[in-house]
């Protein structure tokens, strides 16, 4: 057993998102891999493992905890202009070769991530929630790694955060199970989901399945979570008009009030030779989203280069309601009741 694995295994406890099977095996329910794990073995994420017929899960630490603008997640209709305490652990159920957080997400999968152990800080859920309050944050969010695989620990933190009057959010790849979503429902206010592409073959290369993510978007909305969707637009991977139209049409079929963020790719991890996304590509993607009937489409990662696509507009009278540059909110005219001050149109989102 490696030093990294030994350390991470010491920061675990028996989980709840699993069922028992014959021969001491367990069936993990945290993500849609639904790993059947024999005693002494590990799931696809490598962070959840079977010890003597019980599923042990990450607990009691963070590998990162930062106070960020909530626009960085990105959320555009979830407490805009406020700060969020973002925490993360280690590991992921995908293996995207363009991951922007690969040092934390690919731990135990890629030896280049072994130094992630140095980032670990043991902390209690109560202390983390108290830190969020002291920092002036209005919400806490699980991000950096894939939060689904650490859902039991996230729920413990969210319980403490709710007692402090804070909102709670996930920043996730959306490869969820209904069991996990129902377990999170009492605590989770916002759910940012990555929609990476619209072909199952490409999703399988990353370690997932397209239909599962589409189903998660729909079920999260049905469960009352505020959902925003992000597509990292990668030249040659998902930037064709056909792919973008399929994504936009699907989101509009769930709800045309879902904000869709099309964001620029910068060469990262194992895609260092790939082409960065230019502003024209983001503008084309955003226009497709608007033509598909989505009320709120945003272009990100290229501040100041995408015109008004950083701003929020009223879908009825088209007035500018929130002006942004990058993660900075310059003005916010949405009323406390969540309406346009000019025409009274309800603006979908969480505003307080």
Image (cartoon, rainbow, N blue to C red):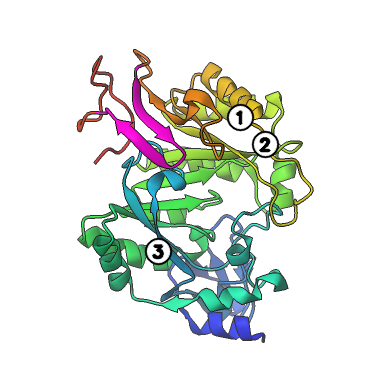
Q: What label does residue 154 carry, if any?
A: 3
Decide: is 69 above or below 27.
above
Tell which of 21 and 256 is nearer to you: 256
Q: Please, what secondary structure does the residue beneath circle 3 have?
A: helix
Q: Residues within 10 Å of mark 3 (few under 14, many from 20)?
A: many
Direction from residue 59 to residue 84 in the image, left or right: left
What residue appears at the point 43 percent right and 75 percent down from the top-left corner?
Answer: 61
Residue linked to disc 1: 282
Q: Quadrant of the N terminus?
A: bottom right
Look at the numbered discs 1 and 2 and tell me whether their residues touch, using CB distance below 8 Å: yes
Q: Please, what secondary structure does the residue beneath circle 2 have?
A: loop
Decide: is 226 above or below 332.
below
Q: Residues within 10 Å of mark 2 (few under 14, many from 20)?
A: many
Rendered image quadrant of residue 227: top left
Q: Magenta stretch? A: 319-334
Q: Earlier in the sequence, mark 1 or mark 2?
A: 2
Q: What label does residue 277 carry, if any?
A: 2
What residue appears at the point 24 percent right and 41 percent down from the top-left corner?
Answer: 352
Between marks 3 and 1, how big is the CA–CA gap? 33 Å
């Amino acid at each position: 057993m490696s030093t990294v694995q030994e350390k991470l295994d010491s920061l675990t406890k028996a989980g709840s998102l699993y069922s028992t099977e014959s021969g001491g095996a367990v069936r993990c329910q945290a993500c849609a891999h639904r790993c059947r794990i024999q005693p002494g073995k590990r799931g696809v994420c490598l962070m959840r493992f079977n010890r003597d017929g019980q599923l042990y899960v990450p607990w009691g630490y963070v590998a990162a905890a930062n106070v960020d603008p909530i626009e960085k997640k990105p959320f555009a209709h979830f407490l805009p202009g406020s700060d969020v305490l973002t925490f993360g652990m280690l590991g992921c159920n995908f293996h995207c070769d363009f991951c922007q957080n690969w040092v934390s997400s690919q731990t135990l999968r890629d030896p280049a991530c072994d130094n992630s152990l140095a980032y670990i800080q043991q902390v209690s859920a109560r202390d983390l929630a108290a830190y969020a309050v002291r920092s002036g944050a209005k919400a806490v969010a699980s991000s950096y790694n894939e939060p689904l695989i650490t859902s039991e620990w996230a729920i413990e933190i969210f319980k403490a955060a709710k007692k402090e009057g804070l909102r709670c959010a996930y920043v996730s790849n959306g490869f969820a199970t209904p069991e996990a979503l129902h377990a999170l429902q009492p605590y989770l206010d916002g759910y940012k989901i990555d929609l990476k592409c619209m072909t199952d073959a490409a999703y399988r290369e990353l370690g997932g399945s397209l239909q599962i993510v589409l189903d998660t978007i729909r079920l999260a909305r049905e469960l009352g979570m505020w959902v925003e969707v992000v597509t990292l637009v990668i030249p040659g991977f998902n930037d064709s008009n056909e792919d973008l139209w399929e994504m936009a049409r699907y989101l509009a079929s769930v709800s045309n009030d879902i904000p869709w963020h099309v964001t620029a790719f910068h060469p990262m991890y194992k895609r260092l030779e790939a082409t960065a996304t230019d502003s024209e590509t983001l503008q084309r993607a955003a226009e497709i989203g608007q033509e598909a009937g989505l009320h709120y489409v945003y272009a990100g990662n290229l501040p100041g280069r995408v015109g008004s696509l950083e701003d929020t507009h009223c879908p009825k009278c088209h007035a500018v309601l929130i002006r942004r540059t990058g993660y900075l909110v310059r003005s916010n005219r949405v009323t406390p009741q969540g309406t346009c001050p000019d025409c009274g149109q309800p603006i979908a989102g969480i505003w307080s």
